């Protein structure tokens, strides 16, 4: 009996120790993310600036588009929701085309941890889906975390003054089966936001719940290693 009690006490102590270590590691990860991403995008506030490279290595800086309306689309070529809106319904292409001549810039961002290693896959998908805008790579997830992008797609709209005015879903129907979508009942939130901005009207809906696949962020430690390697690169 005494031996059993000692064993139970030992087991309880070890369990408490493991839980405390796990909590400490989780807290450490949260602290690393918070320290690295101190600025967070907020509706009604200036959109955080960033510089990312596209599939061809060309740098794109958000602030270079000052005075223009900017749409940011978080993407992942493997996500069924992205595949639907790009390769089947062409929602993104149609929306971008409708405002192409109204000083609107559209940038897709891939914050998947594997994005840098799968550039050719992404390029092929972009070509077959007829992307009409650049795809920027954010493999350490810094920009994605700054904007608190949660899904692919997750849409953001920035007005001419550089203020974030919309965050959320591309439209009001999360169904990716075209047969089950009634085009007369689906509201394109991004199109409505762009229409208001280009017509000098107030944006009525500033936030909606984004739907899609979760953004495949790198773990905090991996992201930090990637950032250090990138900073040290010639």
Image (cartoon, helix red, strand yellow):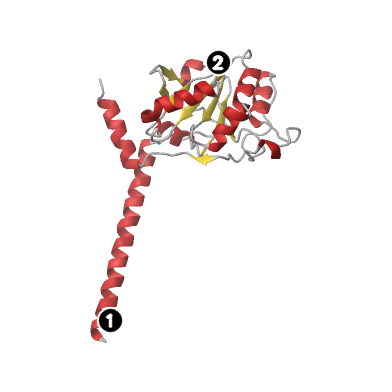
In the displayed structure image, the side of residue 53 where residue 175 appears, left or right: right
Q: Quadrant of the N terminus?
A: bottom left
Quarter of the image holding residue 54? Answer: top left
Q: Residue furthest top?
A: 101
Element marked by disc 1:
helix
Quarter holding the C terminus is top left
Decide: is 47 above or below 2. Answer: above
Which residue reaches farthest bottom? 1
Q: Is residue 165 in view?
A: no
Q: Residues within 10 Å of mark 1 (few under 14, many from 20)?
A: few
Name the residue: 41% across, 23% down: 52
Residue placed under numbered mark 2 in the picture: 67
Residue 166, image quadrant: top right
Does any portion of residue 2 appear in the rendered image?
yes
Secondary structure at numbered mark 2:
loop
The reply, left or right, for residue 172 in relation to residue 151 is right
Residue 144, percent across and down? 45, 34
Q: Residue furthest right?
A: 184
Which of the 4 image quarters holds residue 10? bottom left
Q: Residue at x 65, y 38 (%)?
A: 177
Viewer-proximal residue among 124 and 42: 124
The CA distance from mark 2 to mark 1 is 72 Å
Disc 2, disc 1: CB below 8 Å? no
Residue at x 51% of width, y 37% of height: 79
Q: Position of residue 69 (x, y in %)?
A: 58, 20
Say left or right for 31 vs 201.
left
- Whichever of labels 2 and 1 marks the residue nearer the N terminus, that label is 1
Which residue carries the number 1 mark?
Answer: 5
Is label 2 or label 1 in front?
1
Q: How far across and down, in percent of the image, does residue 145 sit? A: 44, 36
> Which is more toward the observer, 56 or 136?
56
Q: Residue 187: x percent and y percent?
A: 70, 33
């Amino acid at each position: 009996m005494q031996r059993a009690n000692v064993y139970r006490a030992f087991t309880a102590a070890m369990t408490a120790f493991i839980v405390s270590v796990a909590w400490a590691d989780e807290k450490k990860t949260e602290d690393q993310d918070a320290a690295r991403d101190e600025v967070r995008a907020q509706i009604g506030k200036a959109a955080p600036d960033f510089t990312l490279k596209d599939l061809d290595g060309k740098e794109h800086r958000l602030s270079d588009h000052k005075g223009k309306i900017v749409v940011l689309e978080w993407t992942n070529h493997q996500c069924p929701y992205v595949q639907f809106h790009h390769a089947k319904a062409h929602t993104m292409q149609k929306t971008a085309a409708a405002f192409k001549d109204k000083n609107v810039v559209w940038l897709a961002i891939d914050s998947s941890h594997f994005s840098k290693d799968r550039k050719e896959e992404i390029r092929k998908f972009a070509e077959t889906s007829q992307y009409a805008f650049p795809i920027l790579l954010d493999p350490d997830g810094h920009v994605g975390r700054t904007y608190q992008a949660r899904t692919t797609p997750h849409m953001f709209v920035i007005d001419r003054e550089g203020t974030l005015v919309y965050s959320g879903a591309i439209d009001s129907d999360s169904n990716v089966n075209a047969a089950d979508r009634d085009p007369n009942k689906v509201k394109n939130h991004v199109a409505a936001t762009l229409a208001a901005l280009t017509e000098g009207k107030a944006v009525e809906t500033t936030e909606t719940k984004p739907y899609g696949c979760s953004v495949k962020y790198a773990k905090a430690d991996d992201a930090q290693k990637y950032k250090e390697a990138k900073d040290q690169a010639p």
